[in-house]
Image (cartoon, coloured by chain):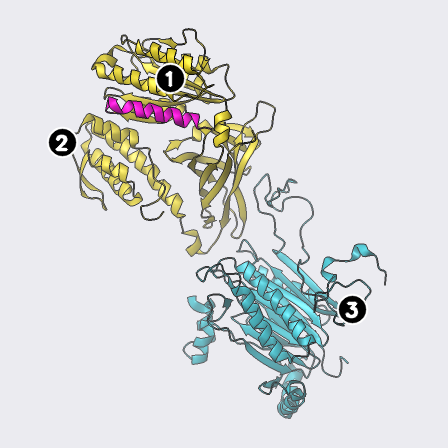
Chain colours: A cyan, B yellow
Amino acid sequence: MTEDPSVVKTAELSCPVCDEVVYPGEDFCEACGHRLDEVAPAPPAAPVVREAGGCTGCGAQAIDGDGYCERCGLRQPADRDHIEIELPGPGGVLAAGASDRGRRYSRNEDSFAIAAHSGGVAVVVCDGVGSSPDPDEASLAAAHTGVTELVTLLEAGADPAAATRDAALRAAEAVAALAPSPDAAPSCTYVSAVTGPSTVTVGWVGDSRAYWLSAVPEAEVDTAEVDTGEFDVEEADTAEQNTADQGTAEVTALGASRQLTDDDSWAAIMVARGALTEAEAEAHPNAHVITAWLGADADEVRPNVRTFSVPGPGAVLVCSDGLWNYLPRAEQLAAAAGDAAADPLGTVRGLVRHALEAGGRDNITVTVIPVAARGNGA
Amino acid sequence: MSDQPQFAITIDQHKYLPEGGREVHAIVSVESSGGGAAATQQPAAEVIIIDTSGSMSYPETKLHAAIAAAQAAIDALRDGVYFAVVSGSNTASMVFPQQAQLVQADAATRHHAKQAVGRLRASGGTAIGSWLRLADQLFDPFQHGIRHAILLTDGKNQHETDAELDAVLYRCADRFVCDCRGIGTDWEVAELRKVANALLGGVGLVADPKDLVADFRAMTEAAMGKAVADVALRVWTPQTAKVRFVKQVLPTVQDLTGRRVDSAPQAGDYPLGAWGAESRDYHVCIEVPPGDVGKELRAGWIKLVVPGPPGQEAQVLATGNVLVSWTDDVALSTKINARVAHYTGQAELTDVIQQGLQARKDGDLDTATARLGRAVQLAEEAGNDAITALLRKVVDVEDAATGTVRLKRNVDKADEMSLDTQSTKTVRTRKGEG
């Protein structure tokens, strides 16, 4: 390990847990003792992917300070128009995420943040509500507050379900604080996923989703599911050792690829009531009306929280509707994702490309966390 | 230059266009504040032009009022301001000083000037172009300060051709600002408006000679309050775009589109004249080639500038952006900015009043009724009460909301001319909204 200070990024200069200044080469934070080597803190300034040299529209070299081409007037891609993040760990990439403006909106109102904690990875994806003012700021505040709180709570020994709920509530407060008045309330959706050694905990408000993508071939999963009849119970029992203080957590074992969240949306309510089929609901003009969100104009925020046990290898995928509009079913996502464990960044890039090619009608954000089967990872 | 007023540009617009949309509209509000001290330090020049054609003594009260008004204007000149008084008939002649030049105002020059004005007699015809040519000659050595003229006339421009007047206006444009006043009812509103527009001034009707004194004093004081002499609106557009129009829409409607002077690559300057502590609004319309949904352009980069001498950079006082973005969200693309709509209505109001009055004059009563009815409707919608009051002197209103009117049979000439001269006056917002 060289210690060339020039390669140090500002994002690495503070402890993600206590914000104390840390230095390259240190394994632990001197203030709180947090292990530093596998932590990539929630990125305050995400890496920017921009074509080098000239206007992206006409190629002219002169771009003024406001980001407009001085010849054709085209607004140049903003930092948030396309973001990719890879979270490196000791044994390979721990997680990756990508977010893109899409092809129909002039800015990216989605945000995401990824961070490692000592037992695994935490991610948050938020989608700014287009009809609210400054939805991009709402999603940014929520994603970064959410991940920071998750890591802090988990490192302090909190149960993943409790940490998930509390982090979502902190994020809700951060978003509510952005509103200058209740009539002008920036707002956004929220979904988080926390992986532990043998569990996945998701929490959400709104219609951004988390999925489980099984790495076990479909045929084998089928057989596995027969087995997991008893396995389920066993998993739930073991999980209780971790969540004993929580008491309320229900733990389901993950088998085949599936959606882990249920949208807080008009469409989901209609389907749940049996009033509409899934296809009818998705085709309805109200399909994207959400019934819960973070924002000063929201009713009391009640995050949904679920914990699952992980018996076999796979990946947790967390995304905004800009992706799942095109690939709503878990099997479709799993097929499009390829081998998420081998190349998380390649997977998220591929999925973003898929959504763009399908029309890119909304901002697109997707993150994946590969999860090894229990026993394999240790 | 230390005490220059602070300028601010505010852009009001709705940037979303539907797929294939080309026209971007924005209201550019320019406001200046402070600079009171600058106004007293700013070198200024004032030329007062009084019509002394024979008709000014029919009745004699017109000439008496003009003399009193010119004297009041002289009193309003602050010490140190360069000034002159010109009398106009078939030709222009110096009233004060005797030589064709400006002199600095002080107690003595003001006294002598007022005495000279008091000796004015009326005779001869009207040749406005020749009067302006003399004013231009007087201002000539003085191109770097506030330059303002007041022109008072009572008649038509009969003793020179339209072409002669147009040539003088072309020559004088941007060399000084001229406010025009018509006294009595024998002058042509359209003609005087042409002069005022070309010279970035206002036009007004003084129906009662008694009101002339206060009016002249107010005009002179306003000119003395200007702190920056030559301001221009610089409009940059993308290489593939073009400016459809630039109109002043507050305090009056004035089309500046034809006044463009190319000033930089992809940019043109629209002269705005001199500025004091005041605010004016401009409606800018830019045509852009249609873009893909999701694309955002800067369709216009608006700068308030004081153009420097040739070869020197302009001084930029304030800037703002006019943006455009294409969307397939119908809810977004069908919205119209409220102020764009308001001023579009106000500009239409100006047009329909002038068209209506012209049609009435030409005996086309159906057109006159339709246009003036529309004017009543627009004035009502905009809350332009001053215009509504003037319209009611020309038409009987049956229903303002639908614009149903009947032309009045007997209309006072002064009322009709007053409506015509006031037709360009706009209001900022609907009543109750601000």
Q: Which residues are magenta?
A: B207-226
Q: Chain of mark 3?
A: A
Q: Chain of mark 1?
A: B
Q: Is residue B225 magenta?
A: yes
**Residue closest to the far bottom:** A230
Q: For the residues tagged 3 and 1, is the chain the same?
A: no
SS state under label 1: strand
Q: Is residue B5 magenta?
A: no
Rounded to the nearest angstrom, the CA distance separating label 3 from label 1 is: 82 Å
Rounded to the nearest angstrom, the CA distance separating label 1 from label 2 is: 39 Å
What residue is shown with label 1? B48
* Image mark for residue B409: 2
Which class describes the residues within 10 Å of circle 2: few (<14), some (14-19), or many (20+)? few
SS state under label 3: loop
What residue is shown with label 3? A30
Ranked by sequence position, the earlier of labels 1 and 2 is 1
